[in-house]
Amino acid sequence: MKTLFSATILSIFLTVSCNSEIEPLYKDKNAPVEDRISDLVQRMTFDEKVLQLNQYLAGENTNVNNIGESTKDMPAGIGSLIYFNSDPEVRNLIQKKAMEESRLGIPILFGFDVIHGYRTIYPISLGVAASWNPELLKKACGVAAKEACLSGIDWTFSPMIDVASDPRWGRVAEGYGEDSYTNSVFGVAAVKGYQGESLSDPYSIAACLKHYIGYGRSEGGRDYRYSDISRQSLWETYMPPYHACVKAGAATLMSGFNDISGVPATANHYTLTEVLKKQWQHDGFVVSDWEAVDQLIAQGVAKDRKEAGLKAFKAGVEMDMKDNIYLENFKQLVDEDKLSISEIDDAVSRILRVKFRLGLFDEPYTKVVPESARYLQPQDKKVAEQLVEESIVLLKNEASTLPFSASVKKVALIGPMAKDKENLIGAWPAKGDCKDVESISEGFEKEFGTRIKVSYALGCDFEGDDESGFSEAISIAKKSDIVVVCIGEKNGWSGENATRSTIALPTIQEQLVVNLKKAGKPIVLVLTNGRPLELVRLEPLVDAIVELWQPGVAGGSPLAGILSGRVNPSAKLAITFPLTTGQIPTYYNMRQCARPFSKMGDYQDISTEPLYWFGHGLSYTTYQYGTAKLSASQITREQKLTVDVTVSNTGKMDGKETVLWYISDPACSISRPIKELKFFEKKEIKAGEKTVYTFEIDPLKDLSYPDETGKYFLEQGDFYVHVGDQKLKFELIK
């Protein structure tokens, strides 16, 4: 009996000893994520939970709109850091502090604004949308994710999918234009590019949809301002891109700075909780924009920081970017029964869920490789270059000025953008370096070599009133066969806090073109900018206009390839170019006019037509659209309808043509826009060949509309499908 008793006691002792050393469930990489989250949250103290809800800074802040701060006193248990450095070893040291000095070893989530590339910078999003090639954007975002990941970044504050039709707003450069469907398609492509097949893939980073929601509607195009948005406009215009990207698996969202019809985006329970979390079942988290929680005081809905924190958190903002309000006030708010532990647990779980899905608990450190293996790889630069080629829009080409004819032997390259690199890279260039940028002048040298003599003159600066360079520019122009004048916006003129009262270029740049006209030579106007421009005075003076946008690192060669004819332009505008600033807002999918006859309601002093509509873009070849054909003239709501059109390349050059398909509903219980883009497709067509484009219309998806509650409805009656200059009628019956 004694021996048996002793053996039993020993067995129990050993079992207890072994169990005490068993690794916690949340550290078991083979356990289900939800089980790991539940286990970890149960182990966390109140202070540890609240730390997860805060985001601090690490490294030098290069955004002039924000103010940097020291991170030497950063707590080891902080939830997230905006990582302004790019050294993975420094990042790993910070992460090591979290893993080894915090009680539970919860990894930090490192975020950064990777907007249009990390180091291999591709065109701004407004330019990318003009490519109508979302698959190419997906590749570019994959490149950005890999470079960012190898530099210590887990999370990008991108894509921006704010539908925007006011080009005075500087942040129009960051989005995909004026159309909701276009923003949806390119937003989904960006999310898939950043996040890959799985967030746990080696080079995947979490996407963040911004700015939720309606920020692009800020009054007068002014940043941080009021947005007067009806529920109808909210659901039909601004919600669809976010819904599409949430369905595509976007890990996080960022609340906007704007005030939505009296309830700021950062304190808007309806959009953040009722819609995002309850209706759309999003299980990631929402981060505020920079100090947006604190700014609820300035917006007039919170009396102090404590109330601001309460309103933002209750609305559905789980992470507080930078202003530390949650950490300062949540203990007191819980003590006052204004916040519950269960609410905090849910928010913490959402943040941990993203960290688990990224694999940070299992591999918290970044692989360290030299910069030469991280950035600007040849195949990655090729993606950026192709994206530039497909983003350049040929706006005007009188008398086939372009491409250069065989008789062109001397080119005058003039203007402040001709040798510039800093402003080609664009706003929000992440870790882009001007020394990596190929200038327009360098692109010309590569493209033309000694075959064409290129002479250069500055002409003028971007702004100011110094006309002393005009005479040299005119002299060079007179000796040339053709003049290429490169003007536009400095990169700081677009982006955040870059609202402009006029979208016209400074007078000095316009005067340069006026004076070059005196040389009597054909003029090609090359524009580099982050928004539509007012060209009403410039357009009559020039023979061709090429919209380069802000192309990033690979601008010169693609532009030179367009001018030489090596590349056939294929881009089309994703945003309308107004004739003048006074026409704003002008966008293609306006509502129908009450008096659409005899120009009633039009401007009395200028044309109501913009200079270039959404979808405008020329080619060096010609495309002929055959007669579009419907598969049926009547369908039921359960049937699908196909529309085919044969497009022939009747010119002498291979080209890529994008066919844009629109739907219109002439009579609906809720009035509809003149037409709405529902599908697009880009295909290459060889010279002399033809191909068929097909749009399959799904009534429940393509003919239904949301009401002011977000509920989609589908009414019987006549509809039209628009393609090219054709308009085909069909009927939806029971």
Image (cartoon, grey):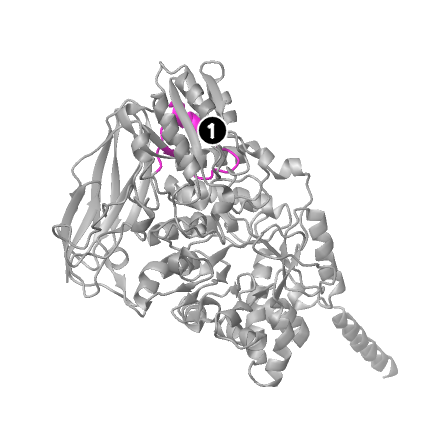
In this rendering, is residue 385 above or below 704?
above
- Mark 1: give few (<14), some (14-19) or many (20+) Cα within 10 Å: many
Residue 598 locus on image (x, y percent): 12, 50
The part of the image, by quadrant, that contains residue 45 is bottom right
The part of the image, by quadrant, that contains residue 512 is top left
Residue 560 among magenta residues: yes
* Circle 1 SS class: loop
Q: Which residue is mark 1?
A: 459
Q: From which residue to which does the magenta span run? A: 546-571
Q: Residue furthest bottom?
A: 336
Residue at (59%, 79%) from the top-left corner? 341
Residue at (18%, 35%) from the top-left corner? 626
Residue 73 locus on image (x, y percent): 74, 63
- Relative placement, left or right, of 615 versus 16 is left
In this rendering, is residue 233 above or below 39?
above
Residue at (66%, 51%) from the top-left corner? 60
Question: Which quarter shows the N terminus?
Answer: bottom right
Q: Nearer the viewer, residue 38 or 312?
A: 312
In this rendering, is residue 376 above or below 479?
below
- Relative placement, left or right, of 706 versus 327 is left
Residue 127 among magenta residues: no
The amino acid at mark 1 is Gly
Question: Which quarter shows the C terminus?
Answer: bottom left
